Image (cartoon, coloured by chain):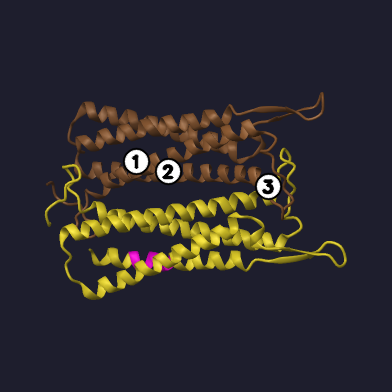
Chain colours: A yellow, B brown
Amino acid sequence: MGYWAAEAEAFLRVCAILFLVLTACLVAMDTQTKFIVYTYAKKATFRDLNALPVLVYVDGAVAGYNLLQLSRCSVSAYCKREIQSPLLKNLSWVHFLLDQVAVYIVFVATTAATQASLLAVTGSKAMQWMKLCNRYTRFCVQMGGALLCGYAACIVLALTSFLSAYNLFRLYSPSKFLQLKSKQ
Amino acid sequence: MGYWAAEAEAFLRVCAILFLVLTACLVAMDTQTKFIVYTYAKKATFRDLNALPVLVYVDGAVAGYNLLQLSRCSVSAYCKREIQSPLLKNLSWVHFLLDQVAVYIVFVATTAATQASLLAVTGSKAMQWMKLCNRYTRFCVQMGGALLCGYAACIVLALTSFLSAYNLFRLYSPSKFLQLKSKQ
C-alpha cells in the first residue's frame, strides 16, 4: 500500500473518531429542566426520543471500530512487509465492506435523529403534534450542534470509505472483469 | 470497460429505476379518509408529514438520473470504441461522484421518512405526541410497503455505486498512489 494512502487513511480515521465521540458526548450530556408549575419540574433528556440513544450507541460503536482500524494502520506502518497478493485482496474486501457498513449505519442513525428533532422544532399540524423547542431552547441548540458534528463525521467516514474502495479496486485489472492484475 | 461490468451495471440501474418509481407511486397514491363524527371526514395523505413529499421528489429525480445513465450504457455498448485514457478517467470520476450523491440522498430521504412514520406508529409519551396508525391502518400498511421498496432501492443503488467505484479505481496503479497504470 502506498505511503500517502496509509497516512491519509490514518488522518481521516482520527478525524472520524473525534467527530463521533464529540457527537455522542453532546447528545448524551444534553439535558434541560423546566419548571412548568411552581413545584412541578419537567426534564428534557436525550431519552425522550428513541432515535437519540440509538445515535449515541451507533456513534460509540463506529468510533471503537475506527480505533481498531487505526491500530491496524500503525502496526502495518511499522512492519512494512509485503503481503501476498490473495491475502491482501481478501483483507481489502473485508475493510471495504466494514467501512461501507460503518458509513451507512452512521448516516441512518444521524438522519433518523435529525428527522425526529426537526419534528420537535416544527411540530405537525396534521398530526396534532406540538412543537417543543420553543420551551427547551438551550436543549435544542445543543442537539443541533451535535447533529452538525454527526454529519461532519458522516462526511469523513464517506471519504474513508472512498479510500478503502480505492485500496481494493486498484488491485484489479482495468480491462478484464474481476481479474487481479500482475505487479506493476 | 468490461462487457460483464456494463451488463451488470445496466441490470442494476433498471432494478433501481423500478424500485424508485414503485416507492414514489406507493407513497404519492397513499390516502385514507376516516369519518370522525358523522359528517366530519379527515383525510390522511402523504402531505401530512414533510418527509414524505421530499421522498417522492428525491426518488423521482434519482430515477431520472439513472434513466440518463442507462441510455449512456446502451449507447456506449453500441459504439464499442476505445476511449482515451485521461477522458475515461475524468468520465469515471464524474459517474463515481454522481452515483455516490444519488445513493446518499436516497438513503437520507428514505430514512427521514421512516423515522417520521415510526413516530406515527409508536407516538412519544415524553413529547405528548399521539399515535395515529391505530386509526389509519390501511394507510400505514401501504406506507410500510413503500418504505421497504425504498430500502430495496437503496441497496441496489449502493451496489451500483460499488460498481462505479470499481470502474474508476481499477484504472489506478496498485503500488503508486493516485497514478494511472499503463494498459494491461
Q: Which of marks 3 and 2 is nearer the N terminus?
A: 2
Type of residue at label 1? Thr
Type of residue at label 2? Val
Callout 1 environment at 10 Å: few (<14), some (14 to 19), or many (20+)? many
Is residue B54 toward the left or the right of residue A71 in the image? right
Q: Is residue A171 above or below residue B90?
A: below
Q: Are marks 3 and 1 on the same chain?
A: yes
Q: Do the residues labelled 1 and 2 touch (CB within 8 Å)?
A: yes
Residue wearing tag 1: B160
Whether residue B106 appears in this view of the structure is yes
Q: Mark 3 to mark 2: distance in Å?
A: 29 Å
Dot label at residue B123: 3
Tell me the SS state at disc 1. helix
Q: Where is residue A175 in the image (x, y as percent from the top left)?
A: 16, 42
In this view, the residue farthest toward the top is B39
Dot label at residue B182: none
A13 inside magenta stretch: yes
Q: Position of residue A23 (x, y in %)?
A: 54, 64
Residue wearing tag 2: B103
What range is drawn magenta here?
A9-15
Q: Where is residue B55 in the image (x, y as percent from the top left)?
A: 54, 37
Main SS type for the magenta part? Answer: helix
Viewer-nearest residue: B90 or A174: A174
Q: Tell me the subunit letter for badge 1.
A: B
Type of residue at label 3? Gly
Q: In this view, does A166 lie above or below A177?
A: below
Q: Tell me the subunit letter for badge 3.
A: B
Tell me the SS state at disc 3. loop
